[in-house]
Amino acid sequence: MNSRRRYIAITACVLLLLVVVAFGISTIREKKAEESAPEYVFLYAENQIADYPTTHGANRFAELVYERTDGRIKILVKPDAELGSEMQVIQQMQYGGIAFARISLSQLAEYMPEMNVLQMPYLYSGPEHMWRVLDGEIGDEFLLKTRDHDLVGLSWYDAGARNFYSTSPITCLEDIKGMNIRVQESDMMADMVSALGANPSKIVYSEVYSAIEQGLVDGAENNWPSYEAMRHYMVARYYTIDEHTRVPELQICSKAVWDKLSESDQKIIEECARESALYERVLWEEREKRSREVAEKSGITVIELSPEEKLRFRDAMQSVYTKYCRDQMDILQAIMEY
Ligand code: GCU
């Protein structure tokens, strides 16, 4: 072989080798991509903004599930009510259109009226009392009951205590009488406000700011973080602390989706949901303080309802208890004594 031929032969060999190596690399890459492509990609609905304790809890949940299923289950968290209002989300979940969500208990109670007993006005003596109930067997039983409604309750998130806020001060029962107050899309909340002599308006969460700004309502009621995160404090400058309700949040899964998962994946999801809830509760405490500071710095007036007035607000709730707890007196009693 002369040197020219040798050169051509060597070049051809090198080229062939390069083609083989390149082909091998791309096959390995494709295989790897196939291996790491998730088996399931699920949507998670959240109606709060991205920087909010429940949304951070949801992100933690999604990360934990992804890690513990080795990337087989990927959960995409969609904040800002991108997937619809809470009521729309619950409806879609009952058909499996959305896999996961964090929902206020008061919205779920519209589908499961028996849930109302957990959010009755002035029911809990404080957060410790509520967590004893929810982290105990009563809370577990209610999570299980969601399964009769095409949902699977996974864990309880914190949403603190709700208070009234308005465009003019509420210092006593007479002040709130005749006011138009926004409430969640909840019959029980509407009845609670009516029992105080005010006129309830059911308005979806994302519309509350403009409803107050445009004077459609004189006020609303919510916890400190919602009041601050949704900028309600800029239009309703009086915040009256009466802590009328503690409405916890639930993380839920669509039953249609749940039934497709293996038992071991279900177990992982339940564990991750409970862990993420503990994380959310820590963030909640911090955010409650920070939100109050932000609102106070802006110059709002904070009114502490006097114990006498609080008693009057509380006494006005008799009819609401009769209407919503009539058939659950035993559970109500158990909650009160827990
Ligand atoms: C809380 C809760 C929301 C709910 C809102 C409301 O902020 O976290 O999920 O929509 O109350 O008052 O509507």
Image (spheres, rainbow, N blue to C red):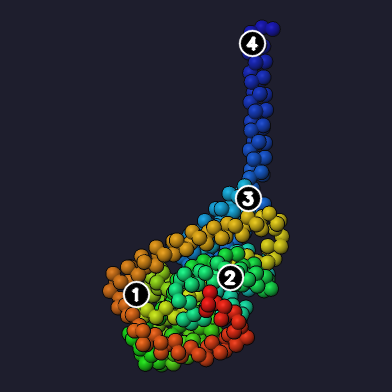
Looking at the picture, how far across and down is residue 163, in whole percent? Answer: 41, 78
Labelled disc at residue 167? none
User: Whole-Å distance between the Cαs marked 2 and 1?
Assistant: 36 Å
Q: Say if mark 1 contacts mark 3, CB within 8 Å.
A: no
How crowded pointer 2 is (Cα within 10 Å; few <14, some 14-19, many 20+) is rated as some
Residue receiving disc 3: 69
Labelled disc at residue 234? 1
Residue receiving disc 4: 4
Ligand 1 under 8 Å from disc 4 Cβ: no
Q: Which comes before the other along the chain, label 4 or label 1?
A: 4
Mark nearest the camera among 4 and 1 is: 1
Disc 2 is placed on an element classified as helix
Q: Quadrant of the N terminus?
A: top right
Q: Which comes before the other along the chain, label 3 or label 4?
A: 4
Q: Say if mark 3 contacts mark 4, CB within 8 Å.
A: no
Disc 1 is placed on an element classified as helix
- Asked whether, in this view, residue 329 is left or right of residue 208, the answer is right
- Asked whether, in this view, residue 41 is left or right of residue 166, the answer is right
The number of numbered discs placed on residues in the rendered structure image is 4
- Identify the residue at horizontal 63%, vertical 55% (top origin): 268
Mark nearest the camera among 2 and 1 is: 2
Q: Quick check: 36 above or below 60?
A: above
The foreground one among 257 and 328 is 328
Disc 3 is placed on an element classified as loop
- Identify the residue at horizontal 33%, vertical 71% (top origin): 295
Q: Is residue 50 visible?
A: no
Mark nearest the camera among 2 and 3 is: 2
- The residue sitting at the top extreme is 2
